[in-house]
Image (cartoon, rainbow, N blue to C red):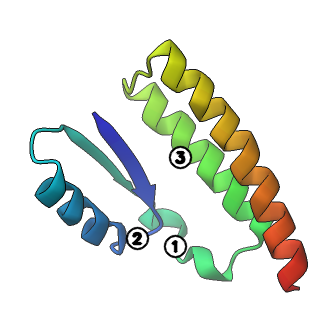
Amino acid sequence: MIALFDSGLGGLTVVRELFRQLPGYDTLYFGDTARLPYGSKSPEVIRRFAAQNTDFLLSKGLRLSSSLATRFRLWRRMWFASTQSMFRCSR
């Protein structure tokens, strides 16, 4: 299963491309329309939303293999660290 989230309808373009390129995979899409747009939010708020959305997807039955879960935790730490640096540099 492939799971993804987005702050609105733009993520549906990604879902459509996933269906085209990976037609045999189940896909779980979460559109966080209650809190859109993300573009006007601070980096800290966006990171919190990303963590909450990920936790939500996991609570709905998304399961990760142990190796994928390890990579995911590493990615999450790296992504949050890199976005902090990116946003700090752009201010």
Q: Is residue 46 left or right of residue 7?
A: right
Q: Are marks 1 and 2 in contact (CB under 8 Å)?
A: yes
Left or right: residue 74 compared with residue 18 = right
**From the viewer's perspective, is 28 left or right of 41?**
left
Disc 3 residue crowd, few under 14, some 14–19, many 20+, Cα 10 Å: some
Q: Secondary structure at mark 1?
A: loop
Please tell me which of labels 1 and 2 falls first in the chain: 2
- Which residue does the numbered mark 1 point to in the structure image? 36
Q: CA distance from mark 1 to mark 3?
A: 13 Å
Identified by mark 1, the residue type is: Leu
Residue that lies at the very extreme toward the top in this rendered image: 66
Residue at the disc numbered 3: 53
Q: What residue type is disc 2 on? A: Gly
Judge whether 37 appears above or below 80 on screen.
below
The span from disc 1 to disc 2 (Cα, nearest Å) is 6 Å
Give residue 8's mark. 2
Residue under the image location 36 percent in, 23 percent down: 61
